[in-house]
Amino acid sequence: MTPDPKRRSLLFGAALSPLATPMLMGAATADTEAGPSNAIDLSHAYPFYGPGPQAGIATAPQRHVVYMTFDLTSENPRDLQVLLARWSASIAQIMKGEPISKVDPDRPDAGALDTGEALDLGPASLTVTVGLGPDLFEKTGLQAHRPAGLRPLKHLPGDALTPEISGGDLSLQACADDPQVAYHAIRVLARLAKSTGTASTRYAVMGFGRASAGKGQATPRNLLGFRDGTRNITSDADREAFVWTDEPGWGKGGSYQVMRKISMFIESWDTDQIDDQNAVFGRFKVSGAPLTGTQEFDTPDFTAQGPHGPVIPANSHISLAAHEHNDGLKILRRSYNYTDGINALGMLDAGLLFLSYQNTPEAFERLQTRLGAADRLNDYISHVASGVFYIPPAPAEGSYIGAQMFG
Ligand code: HEM
């Protein structure tokens, strides 16, 4: 279908600065084939301040992510307090599409806090979500404030974790519809952490082509070519029941973030025939429908029998992960595809930056215990990195993340 230029300018033109428009015209395709739910408006900004949870969890997933974790280099709680305050003020600024500092025209010889590469790009729906790691509280003497469920994940079946790219004391998840806007956010925040002597960078993953659908979005595809996010949490009721915590005190209404870097054996997958790939997931590759249905959103019938047993194999990914087989348990998935180029063997080095949000890390552990032990998908993936972080609620305007911890 040919795009109607009038309709396009109605949808996207009105609120844009002249500088943002050329970029947008290159990026926005979605009011044509894919439907308005995939539209990108690079002038759109989300608020950072609360009340409510931090942005970047229930927010409809943007196209790109830069995810970075940090190690504390100071165990002085005052340093952490200053860093969280400076990060919060800076994030509020860059989520509006504004630099964290302006260049002083009278001081061209001075250095600038903001690095400049996102000037004129617009907010691009940037969200920066700040997480606190399990060891941070003991290290800084704040153990009285550690959220009850926050501890390193237990060893799970299928773990092949590399310690250097796992764990961390702080996490930043920057999502935006422009990758340079997301990268800029992480870059200036990492610079602040380093310049205050409070935290150093630990590892980073850059993700693209969101691999999870949010409310109102068309379902994207992961690098195995399957629609991902068809049965994800999209309702407030499910978020209340499964995502937001009921921690007493300062952390109430936050969430636990689990990060898994899951490498895919892409070359091997690509030689597999489609009906086997369908059986791995329990869904049809092209339509996304369960093997017992014809439409993507048909409810899977796990009881339907074929000549060789259940139509949706019991060891398929969706059969093992479905809430019907896990005492009603659900998690919110917010994953992205990633690539690190080519590995030492000359193979494509790519996979899923799996990010999930739940009201206890145990929810993830329960699902991964089943998947890691029996999932047919395990022939094609390997969990190479892992992290767990508490995501405090958003601060009120004028305050900062975790302020209550510091009395
Ligand atoms: C590379 C790794 C993974 C890939 C490629 C993958 C892909 C998929 C796909 C294609 C679906 C079906 C569409 C949908 O409903 O979203 C799905 C469903 C699901 N996945 Fe994964 N997934 C991976 C890892 C995980 C992990 C580690 C977990 C949790 C421990 C998980 C939990 C789920 C859940 C809960 C569902 C929904 C099942 C249902 O209710 O039907 N996935 N995944």
Image: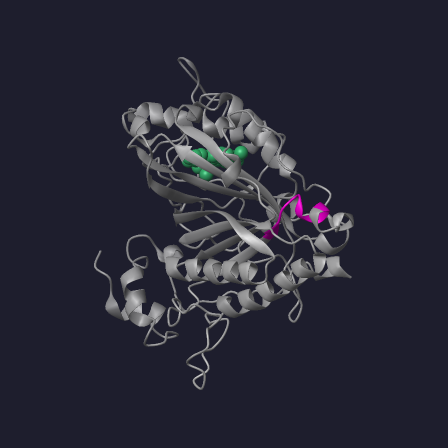
Q: Is residue 286 above or below residue 68?
A: above
Magenta extent? 131-138
User: Residue 67 vs residue 16: left or right?
Assistant: right
- Determine whether 173 is above or below 330 in the image: below
- Residue 336, by quadrant, is top left
Q: Within the magenta stretch, is there residue 38?
A: no
Total residue callouts = 0
Q: Is residue 299 visible?
A: no
Q: Nearer the viewer, residue 188 or 53?
A: 188
Residue at the (54%, 43%) spot, across then down: 356
Position of 275 relative to 25 (above/below) = above
Instruction: Determine the image quadrant of residue 41.
Output: bottom left
Q: Is residue 58 above or below residue 292?
A: below
Left or right of 27? Residue 382 is right
Instruction: List the single residue furthest toward the top.
Output: 308
Q: Quadrant of the N terminus?
A: bottom left
Q: Residue at x 50, y 74 (%)?
A: 101
Figure quadrant of residue 42: bottom left
Query: Measured from the top left, where is residue 268 in percent x and y?
Result: 31, 26
- Whole-percent x, y for residue 31 in the image: 32, 59
Query: As drawn, is 385 to the left or to the right of 401?
Result: left
Q: What is the residue that sits farthest to the bottom in this orientation? A: 106
Observer-nearest of 23 and 317: 23
Image position, residue 93 (x, y; %): 52, 70
Task: Give whichever of 64, 89 is nearer the camera.
Answer: 89
Question: Which residue: 61% across, 30% down?
Answer: 366
Is any atom of residue 390 visible in this view? yes
Q: Is residue 137 magenta?
A: yes
Q: Locate the C terminus and report the quarter of the image it occupies.
A: bottom right
